[in-house]
Image (spheres, grey):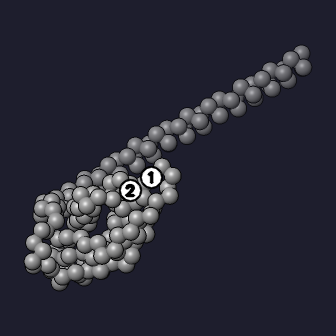
Amino acid sequence: MAEVAKQEEVVEQKGGSSKVLILIASILFLVLIGGGIAAYMMLNGDDEVINDANSARHSQVVKHNAKAIQGRSDDLANIGPMYALDKFIVNLASDGGSRYLRTSINLELSSPEFQAEVDKKKPLVRDIIIRVLSAKSYEEISTIRGKETLKDELVTELNKVFIDGQVKNVFFTEFVIQ
């Protein structure tokens, strides 16, 4: 009989410890759910402030880009201030990756005061130009029409990032494809 009583105590102790584990797991689960709901409520309130700031910036960019959509200037008799960029050497988009473009570019600016913003954003300007150039294939830019289309695309892409002025035109002072 003593052995049976000891076995029942062991069974009760094992059953009691599993009840404690279930209770702890339940409490932990409720704490996690509560924390998730609290975090959601806190973060959701900030979205309105962020969305208001983003929409204000978006409307400013849309207003600015409306003038940028005008395209390249074709008034070659009244060329504005020029901004010379360093040489670009990029691989062209091709199957073998064996072709590259070496070019020098000058940007025609809308005003002399605009040069300060271009100076400030020069790394961004170079990045945009490299991205556009390296996405082109030999066939796309080997013709005069292709070069003109490339100029239009560069002006459009560059003017998306400027606020104080705009790039009126792009001039290639060197253009070598190999």
Q: Is residue 6 visible?
A: yes
Q: Judge by depth and name the residue closer to the eye, 29 or 7.
A: 29
Where residue 149 sits: x, y (%)?
24, 58
In the displayed structure image, the side of residue 61 where residue 130 appears, left or right: right
| Callouts 2 and 1 close, C-beta under 8 Å | yes
Label 2 SS = helix
Report which quarter residue 144 is drawn in: bottom left
Task: Give me the disc on residue 94.
Answer: 1
Figure quadrant of the C terminus:
bottom left
Looking at the rendered image, the quarter that the N terminus falls into is top right
As shown in the figure, which amino acid type bears the numbered disc 1? Ser
> Label for residue 138?
2
Q: Nearer the viewer, residue 158 or 58?
A: 158
Q: Position of residue 50 (x, y in %)?
A: 27, 57
**Residue 26 locus on image (x, y percent):** 55, 34
Residue at the spot 62% in from the left edge and 31% down from the top edge: 22
Residue at 19% in and 79% down: 114
The type of residue carrying mark 2 is: Tyr
Q: Gap in Å between the C-alphas at discs 2 and 1?
A: 8 Å
